[in-house]
Image: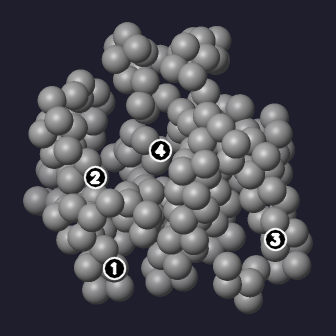
Amino acid sequence: MSQEAFTADQLSFIIRVQGDLRNHMRAVKPRRYEHSLSVAETAQKLALLYDVDPFEARVAGILHDWDKVLPDEELLRRSQERGIDLGVDLELVLPLLHGILAARELPEIYPELSRDVLVAIERHTTAAVDMTPLDMVVFVADGIEPLRRSCPNIDQVRAMVGKSSLEDLFWNSFAGGISYVVDTRRYLYPGTIEIYNELVRRRAS
C-alpha cells in the first residue's frame, strides 16, 4: 500500500478496516479476501491516475464484497428484510445483492463512511447511468484486479489503463460483463439492459 497518499487518520482507518475484513472474511472465503485487497490496491492506483480520491477508492475496494461471505439464503433474507426491490424475484439476481445490501449494512459498523463510498459499493454490482468517477474506479478495479483470470475483455481493459478515459474504461468493463453473462447463458437483470441502452444513447450523442 502506498501510504503517502493518505493522512495519518486515513491510514489508521484503512488499517482498521483491513483488519476487520480479515477477521470477517479470510477464514470463510480466503480467495474473496485476497480479491478484496487486490481490488483495493487497484482502485487506489486507478484513483491516482484519474484524479479520484485515493482514500475513498481504497476503502470502497476493501469493503465492496463485505457481504459475499453470506450463504445465498442469508443474503436473500437480509435483502428482503432491508426492503431491497429490483423489480424482479430477488432469487434471480442473487449475484447483484451483496453490494446493495452492504451499502445498507455497513453504516451501522462504520458510521463515518461517506455517502460516496457507500454508493460506489452498491453500484459495483449493478452499475448505473450516472456513475461517478469513484463508482467507475471501483467497478473497473473489481473487474481487472491482477488476481482475475486473464480473458480477452479483461486484458483489453487492463491495456487501456492510463491511455483511455475513465469513462471508456468503465464502458468496456461494463459491456464486457454483459457479454460474459450472455455467453454463460445466465439471467440478465432487466435493469442492466436499461443502463446499457441509455449509455449507448449517451455515447452516440
Q: Quadrant of residue 57?
A: bottom right
Q: Which mark is residue 123?
A: 4
Q: For the residue carrying disc 2, how many other residues have a C-alpha within 10 Å: few (<14), some (14-19), or many (20+)?
A: many
The amino acid type found where label 2 is placed reads Phe
Circle 3: element type: helix
Circle 1: element type: loop
Residue designated by label 1: 161
Circle 4: element type: helix
Q: For the residue carrying disc 3, how many other residues have a C-alpha within 10 Å: few (<14), some (14-19), or many (20+)?
A: some
Residue designated by label 3: 10
Closer to the chain start, of discs 1 and 3, is 3
Spot occupied by residue 46 in the image (x, y as percentages of width and height): 48, 76
Q: Quarter holding the C terminus?
A: bottom left
Q: For the residue carrying disc 1, how many other residues have a C-alpha within 10 Å: few (<14), some (14-19), or many (20+)?
A: some
The amino acid type found where label 1 is placed reads Val
Q: Which mark is residue 174?
A: 2
Q: CA distance from mark 4 to mark 2?
A: 11 Å
Asked if 170 appears above or below 46 in the picture, the reply is above
Q: CA distance from mark 1 to mark 2?
A: 15 Å
Spot occupied by residue 119 in the image (x, y as percentages of width and height): 57, 46
Closer to the chain start, of discs 2 and 3, is 3
Q: Quadrant of residue 168?
A: bottom left
The amino acid type found where label 4 is placed reads Arg
